[in-house]
């Protein structure tokens, strides 16, 4: 099963500018990470819930696509 929450994204530290890599799941869970550059803690926030909604919407669409492909495959015999 496809799960977009495991997708990795990069963002720059607001203090030192170092590139940090997180998963969308970490953003969803609003985890605290440690910057790879300056070692300061960064609290991930999803103020408006857009990360959570997007992950949910994409996973739902992927599941629907998977189901459609399975149904489509029933019409062909190999």
Image (cartoon, rainbow, N blue to C red):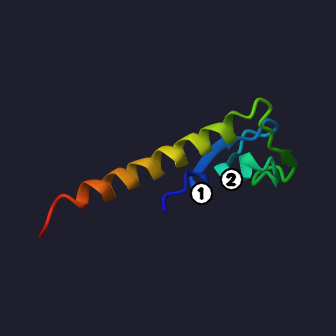
Q: Disc 2 designates what residue?
A: 25
Q: Which mark is residue 52?
A: none
- Residue at the location (15% across, 61% down)? 76
Marked residue nearer the N-terminal end (1 or 2): 1
Where residue 4 appears, as percent x and y from the top left, is: 55, 51
Foreground: 78 or 33? 78
Where residue 36 appears, as percent x and y from the top left, is: 75, 54
In the image as oriented, which residue stretches furthest toward the bottom? 78
Question: Would you say residue 11 is visible in this rendering?
Answer: yes
In this picture, residue 7 sits left or right of residue 46: left
- Residue at the location (78% across, 40% down)? 16
Quarter of the image with the C terminus is bottom left
Q: In which image quadrant can residue 52 be found?
A: top right
Q: Is residue 54 above or below residue 63?
A: above
- Residue at the location (48% across, 62% down)? 1
Where residue 50 appears, as percent x and y from the top left, is: 68, 33
The secondary element bearing badge 2 is classed as: helix
Graded by Cα atoms within 10 Å as few (under 14), some (14 to 19) or many (20 or more), the crowding at tag 1 reads few
Q: In which image quadrant can residue 73 be found?
A: bottom left
In this picture, residue 61 sits left or right of residue 43: left
Foreground: 11 or 59? 59
In this picture, residue 7 sits left or right of residue 29: left
Q: Disc 1 designates what residue?
A: 6
Question: Would you say residue 23 is visible in this rendering?
Answer: no
Where residue 48 appears, as percent x and y from the top left, is: 76, 29
- Residue at the location (39% across, 48% down)? 65
Graded by Cα atoms within 10 Å as few (under 14), some (14 to 19) or many (20 or more), the crowding at tag 2 reads some
Mark 1 and mark 2 in contact? Answer it, CB < 8 Å: yes
Foreground: 39 or 61? 61
């Amino acid at each position: 099963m496809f799960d977009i929450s495991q997708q990795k994204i990069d963002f720059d530290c607001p203090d030192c500018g170092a590139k940090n890599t997180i998963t969308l799941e970490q953003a969803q869970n609003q985890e605290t990470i440690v910057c790879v550059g300056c070692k300061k803690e960064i609290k991930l926030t999803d103020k408006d819930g857009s990360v959570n909604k997007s992950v949910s919407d994409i996973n739902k669409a992927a599941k629907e696509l998977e189901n459609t492909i399975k149904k489509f495959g029933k019409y062909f015999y190999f």
